[in-house]
Amino acid sequence: MKDNFDIFFRRKPALMLVALKKMSKARYGSLLAKEVDCTYSHAVKILQTLEALGLVVFEKKGRIKLIKLTKKGEEISENIDSIRRQLA
């Protein structure tokens, strides 16, 4: 439980979920990494954790993997964004 809780209070995973929520269509991992200012390999590691938690899914389009939020991921990203707006 602690590991699942901790991931949402780190900046990069929270920013990734919010970035995916803001764009309703699937995103490329490399673009997402640039958007949250981290390396591609770090982004992939975070995304794999988010996938294991059931928050994102990978869709393969040829050689490219697109990332989309699941319903659970959408709900959590909305809550994170709401907290961020309240603190701003």
Image (cartoon, helix red, strand yellow):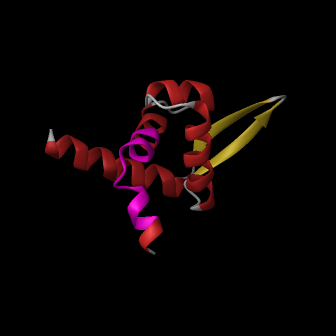
Q: What stretch is highlighted in magenta?
A: 4-16
Residue 87 falls in image quadrant: top left
**Which residue is pictured at 42% across the width and 72% down the height?**
2
Q: Is residue 34 magenta?
A: no
- Residue 43, percent from left and from top: 56, 39
Q: Residue furthest right?
A: 62
- Residue 81, percent from left and from top: 31, 44
Residue 1 falls in image quadrant: bottom left
Q: Is residue 12 magenta?
A: yes
Q: Is the magenta stretch mostly helix, strand or loop?
A: helix
Numbered-mark total: 0
Position of 24 with respect to 29 (left or right) is left
**Which residue is pictured at 57% across the width and 62% down the height?**
53
Query: Relative to the observer, which residue lies in front, 47 or 61?
Result: 47
Q: Is residue 51 visible?
A: yes
Q: Can residue 26 be seen in this view?
A: no
- Residue 23, percent from left and from top: 48, 30
Q: In which quarter of the image is the C terminus?
A: top left
Rendered view: 1 above or below 35? below
**Which residue is pictured at 55% across the width and 47% down the height?**
46
Query: Relative to the observer, which residue lies in front, 32 or 59?
Result: 32
Rendered view: 25 above or below 14? above
**Which residue is pictured at 53% across the width and 54% down the height?**
71
